[in-house]
Amino acid sequence: MNVTSHKHAIGTVFDQAAAEFDQSGVPFFTPLGRRLVEIAAPEPGEHILDVGCGRGSCLFPARDRVGPGGTVTGIDISAEMVRLTADEAQRRGLTNVTLEVMDGERPRFPRDSFDVVLAGFSIMHMPLAPDSLTAYLTVLRPGGRFCFTDLVDDKGLPPFVPAAAFAVLEPHFPAGPNPRERGTASWSSTVESTIGALTARGFEGVRVEEDVFSMTLADGGQWADWSMSTGLRAAWERIPPAQHAGVRARVAQAVQAVARGPGTVTLPVPVRFVTARRPS
């Protein structure tokens, strides 16, 4: 794997998707971001780092918890995500929220900077994890919490991607990252392997909470539109304009088949909420 080109590809895809990311009306990143913040339980006055902040699904709920006496710093590899989220923070008048373009595997902060590090569905895109996660032991204060969400993949495929829909998009992916980039031998493929990997790298008190989130969409067409705001955009961008409508119709039909008829589509999405601490 060429790590540099891998990260560049991810940054490019999410730059392209940033304007629509988590803005389509499909409830997914926002409610799961709030849930992660609830589990991390930031306290008033604490200092938070949000890794892979996207459009703020964790960042803004974390700011609500820490109040004006705390701080929230969001970092993302996508400059466009950072720009749009910084604009939103300014619109809300949040003077204690800072956004920076930064590689989440190489956080450039002094030791003992944060009480909590949050990462909502960003660790899964890091090619050097779990080894790179030791960086958070440094930027966390003693006793600080590291909390992230991960997907329970089906043979490397994110659970919100029906296999039949992926089969339509798969030929259009570039040679770089696609939804199966993690394969089936990931360090986080099981609860036990996740706990073992983090413990081996110096974290303590590792806990994994599993839940199934019901992703509800009006129909298969809405899923197709929503998918363009995710990493699946890497495929959508390579579809010739003359073929786009046809591919969209085939994808929508494949997703609609999950519902076994017209109308609402509900996709069960198994999610892991992982918490760990820097030793005191």
Image (cartoon, rainbow, N blue to C red):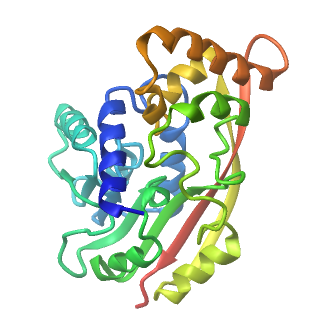
Describe residue 96's horizontal placement relative to residue 193 as left or right.
left
- Residue ID at (51%, 25%): 226
> Residue 91 at what x, y percent from top left?
19, 31
Q: Which of 209 and 11 is in front in this view?
A: 11
> Residue, x 44% and y 32% (percent of image)?
233
Determine if residue 152 is in view: yes
Q: Out of 232 and 209, give the one closest to the viewer.
A: 232
> Measured from the top left, where is residue 66 in percent x and y?
32, 57
Quarter of the rendering occupied by the N terminus: bottom left
The quarter holding residue 164 reads: top right
How far across and down, in percent of the image, does residue 68 sit?
22, 53
Q: Position of residue 33 (x, y in %)?
A: 48, 47
User: Where is the C terminus found, in terms of image quarters?
Assistant: bottom left
Residue 70 found in image quarter: bottom left
Residue closest to the eye, 240 or 113? 240
Residue 236 lies, with reference to residue 74, above or below; the image says above
Residue at horizontal 59 percent and vertical 72 percent from the top: 187
Q: Is residue 131 above or below residue 249?
A: below
- Left/right of residue 114 with respect to residue 186 in the rendered view: left
Instruction: Name the residue rendered at 32%, 27% in the picture.
Output: 19
- Quarter of the image for residue 13 reads top left
Q: Which residue reaches farthest right?
A: 260
260 and 213: which one is in front? 260
How many numbered callouts? Answer: 0
Could one spot residue 219 in this view of the protein?
no
